[in-house]
Image: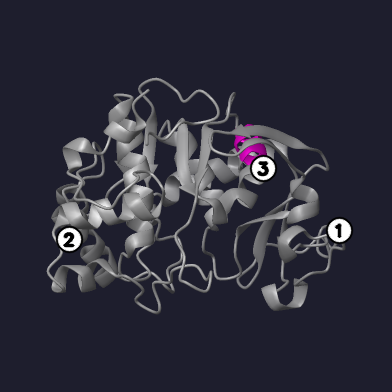
Amino acid sequence: MPFTPLTQLPDRPVTRFAPAPTGYLHLGHVVNAVFVWGIARARHGTVLLRIEDHDRKRCQLEYEMALLEDLDWLGLEPDAGTSAELRAGPSPHRQRDRESLYLEALARLERSQQVYACDCSRKGIAFDGGDVPNEETRYGGRCRGRGLSRAAGRGLRVVIDDGDERFVDAALGAQTQIPARQCGDLLVRDRLGRWTYQFAVTVDDLEQGVNLVIRGRDLLASTGRQIWLARMLGRAAPPVFLHHPLIVKPGGEKLSKASHDTGIRELRAAGMTPGQVLGRAAFLAGIVAAERPLSVEALGDPFRE
């Protein structure tokens, strides 16, 4: 039951596995890892491990060390951003160690687009924009013309042009998104001085040469704005995006770190082997037809043409 993408994937792709250390890894993360490592190995590509800890409030060193331990146990060794490197100290594969790159990218963005200060809170701007797909929070531009100075307690936004972003998702086919209507002017740094996910991940993918982004369908809505932002930062061509299915609870709710759903640590304690965990994830994601142990060496098999 090989996985067949709807569009051509790059040869020798550079892709990434990018967990946020806000909790322990669960089967949903392993599903993403199976797609990432499997496609990369099938196409002789490169896997980067990136620690997405831009949210300093929620990310914890305890969780980072735990996810490195779980990846080691599963046998999922990246080609760059190895656990040994990350344990040794500052690394370009950890977002909190990339401050100078984000500052340079912000300066580059300011040369091509209007960036302005904003003192609005998330609670204060929720759903202020009319037609909002999937009930997404949209910023209506309240601070765009206020001329606020840049100061503590104020975020930074970039004006998004009102136009279509068209792309072909490797799993879902042709897509059209209008970021200005979905999210409004994009927050790049929040009121606490933290870089946002949308900004940091776009800069990281550009600077690290990622040309294949493999992630869950819950992030599909972010794609158009990231393609637009990358273009404003000077990226000539966007990466290929592949949004894979999510595995969910029986009631349809997404797995959650907070509620410890199918956590890797719990599965290990229950006596499951790494191969059994990888096999279960591949089965639940529809990558293989039957649940059976799957070795790291065999992860590429379902993705070979």
Where is the C terminus found, in terms of image quarters? Answer: top left
**CA gap, disc 3 to disc 1?**
25 Å
Q: Amino acid at mark 3?
A: Gly
Q: Which mark is residue 69?
A: 2
Does the rendering let one see residue 51? no
Residue pictured at 37% horizontal, 33% vertical? 2
In the image, taking residue 7 as reference, residue 231 lies left or right, namely right
Circles 1, 2 touching at the beta carbon (< 8 Å): no
Q: Position of residue 248 (x, y in %)?
A: 47, 65
Considering only vertical position in the picture, is 174 above or below 182? above
Tag 3 secondary structure: helix
Q: Nearer the viewer, mark 1 or mark 2?
A: 2
Residue pictured at 72% horizontal, 61% vertical? 134
In the image, taking residue 88 as reference, residue 33 lies left or right, namely right
Mark 2 surroundings: few (<14), some (14-19) or many (≥20) residues within 10 A:
some
Tag 1 secondary structure: loop
Q: Nearer the viewer, mark 3 or mark 1?
A: 3
Residue pictured at 16% horizontal, 68% vertical? 268
In the rendered image, which residue does mark 1 sit on? 145
Considering only vertical position in the picture, is 91 above or below 273? above
Residue pictured at 39% horizontal, 36% vertical? 15
- Image quarter of residue 187: bottom right
Q: Amino acid at mark 2?
A: Glu
Considering only vertical position in the picture, is 300 above or below 12? below
Total label count? 3
Q: Amino acid at mark 1?
A: Gly
Q: Earlier in the sequence, mark 1 or mark 2?
A: 2
Does the rendering let one see residue 229? yes
Q: Position of residue 29 (x, y in %)?
A: 36, 57
The boundaries of the magenta stretch are: 227-233
